[in-house]
Amino acid sequence: MDDPRQLPGGPAVFAGAPPGAVPRVDGTLDYWRAGLDDVPEEVWTRPGPEVLLLCDNRLTSVPARIGTLTTLHTLDLGHNRLGSVPPEIGALTGLTRYLYLHDNLLTDLPDSLGALTRLAYLNVGENRLTALPETLGAMTGLVELRAQDNRLTRLPAGLGRLTALRELWLRGNGLTDLPDSVRDLRDLRELELRDNALETVPESLRGLPRMRRLDLRGNRLSELPRWVAGLPSLEKLDLRWNDVRVPPGLLDELTGRGCVTLL
């Protein structure tokens, strides 16, 4: 998905610029790398912003008033020092494109995130999360979910309700399995499970019709199940940094149908 910070027009505020932003004609308030410790007061007085970029600052908190910015379709709070996200974020039901919360100090997320049912992209990677909210399954508009480099040991049972999901990034956690409901992610195309604690390839991935790239590097896998060859769209399977045994003929079968397999 396109990054709003790379859209035509570029950032309005650059490194070293004083705090403050001039709204662009596209409805963007851009405070990228503006040296902010607090959310500027003008954020609450500008009429109808659609994009709010507060990334790469020194924010430690976000006021509850964030829930009043109901015209936003994109919110970027990434690369700050946030220890929590206010539950009022769930009032931003107009968020349909991007929500960036990555590279902060978050240990949990509010259940109210589940109210963002039209959001397409959520990035909560590079935090200190030990779990994702059970309400995540209500976010049925998600096309891409990034939760890499956290401390997750399990995922919500309702993950399979995200039937529009195409990309799921879970690198660098402590996952030992995936929920059974993952078998319902029929549109999932890319799954990154690198650097987790998997001892077997999750059975819930069996038969997923559109899975193209499956990254299982750096786990504890000992054997590759034969059913992997039955993933009809698989183009790349990465098994490096596992002590994995491949059943006779399986590698040839995968290679013969055009799947790149890395051991």
Image (cartoon, rainbow, N blue to C red):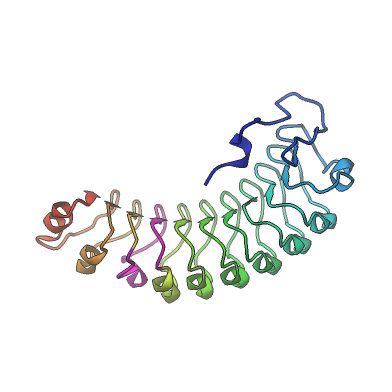
Residue 260 appears left or right of 173? left
SS assignment for the magenta stretch, majority: loop
Q: Does the magenta-highlighted stretch encompass residue 201?
A: yes
* Residue under the point 19% across and 51% down: 258
Residue 55 appears left or right of 232? right
Q: Percent from the top left, x then y, of residue 180?
A: 42, 76
Residue 37's place in the image compared with 183, above or below, is above
Along the line of sight, the residue nearer the viewer: 127 or 101: 101
Q: Percent from the top left, x then y, of residue 107?
A: 65, 58
Residue 236's place in the image compared with 109, above or below, is above
Q: Percent from the top left, x then y, of residue 253?
A: 13, 58
Q: Percent from the top left, x then y, of residue 112?
A: 71, 67
Residue 175 appears anywhere in the view: yes
Q: Residue furthest left?
A: 249
* Residue under the point 45% across and 63% down: 175
Residue 99's place in the image compared with 229, above or below, is above
The quadrant holding residue 167 is bottom left
Residue 263 appears anywhere in the view: no
Along the line of sight, the residue nearer the viewer: 222 or 211: 211
Question: For the magenta stretch, what is the residue range?
Answer: 186-209
Residue 130 appears left or right of 229? right
